Image (cartoon, rainbow, N blue to C red):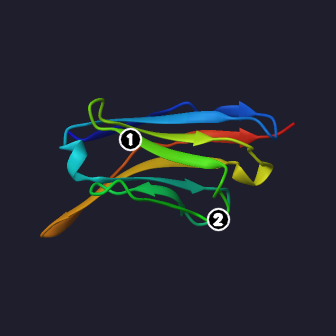
Amino acid sequence: QVQLVESGGGLVQPGGSLRLSCAASGFTFSRYAMNWYRQAPGKERELVAGFSRIGGSTIYADSVKGRFTISRDNAKNTVYLQMNGLKPEDTAVYYCNARAKFGQTFDYWGQGTQVTVSS
């Protein structure tokens, strides 16, 4: 059974930091690209950061470049999102995503973790 379990969300003041974790199970973690998405109220879900399965390349939304860092530990089947310099506009539910193509596309999602940036 595939599971993606996010943790680390919460309430933080502007300028603060949080580290999100996503523990994966039920699939071969190293064969999947791992991504973080977020969805704010009334807005569409957007890609925040991604980490490829091959080559270790990363991508970031322009709005988080220089502030957020995605990393993965294949030995622990875990992907992280270090968020620094948080802003109120970063407030959203953050979702972990695993994606791969083996003939067909496999796309798994976590349940989400709330991040609220407010003073």
Describe residue 63's horizontal placement relative to residue 35 as left or right.
right
Q: Position of residue 5 (x, y in %)?
A: 40, 35
Q: Is residue 40 above or below residue 111?
A: below
Residues under numbered marks 1 and 2 in contact, where contact means CB atoms less than 8 Å apart: no
Q: Quadrant of the C terminus?
A: top right
Q: Label 2 belongs to which residue?
A: 43
Q: Three-letter amino acid code at disc 1?
A: Arg
Compare residues 52 and 34 and report the one nearer the observer: 52
Q: Furthest-right residue in view?
A: 119
Q: Label 1 belongs to which residue?
A: 72
Q: Position of residue 2 (x, y in %)?
A: 24, 41
Q: Position of residue 43 (x, y in %)?
A: 64, 65
Q: Is residue 44 above or below residue 84?
A: below
Residue name at image x 29 percent, y 35 percent: 77
Q: Position of residue 36 (x, y in %)?
A: 48, 51
- Which SS class for mark 2? loop
Q: Three-letter amino acid code at disc 2?
A: Lys
Residue name at image x 28 percent, y 37 percent: 74
- How packed is label 1: few (under 14 Cα within 10 Å), some, or many (20 or more)? many
Mark closest to the chain's N terminus, 1 or 2: 2
Describe residue 98's horizontal placement relative to residue 59 as left or right.
left
Q: CA distance from mark 1 to mark 2?
A: 27 Å
Compare residues 26 and 86 and report the one nearer the observer: 86
Q: Is residue 45 above or below residue 83?
A: below
- How packed is label 2: few (under 14 Cα within 10 Å), some, or many (20 or more)? few
Q: Quadrant of the N terminus?
A: top left
Q: Is residue 25 above or below residue 30?
A: above
Describe residue 113's horizontal placement relative to residue 89 as left or right.
left
User: In terms of image quadrants, where is residue 66?
Assistant: bottom right
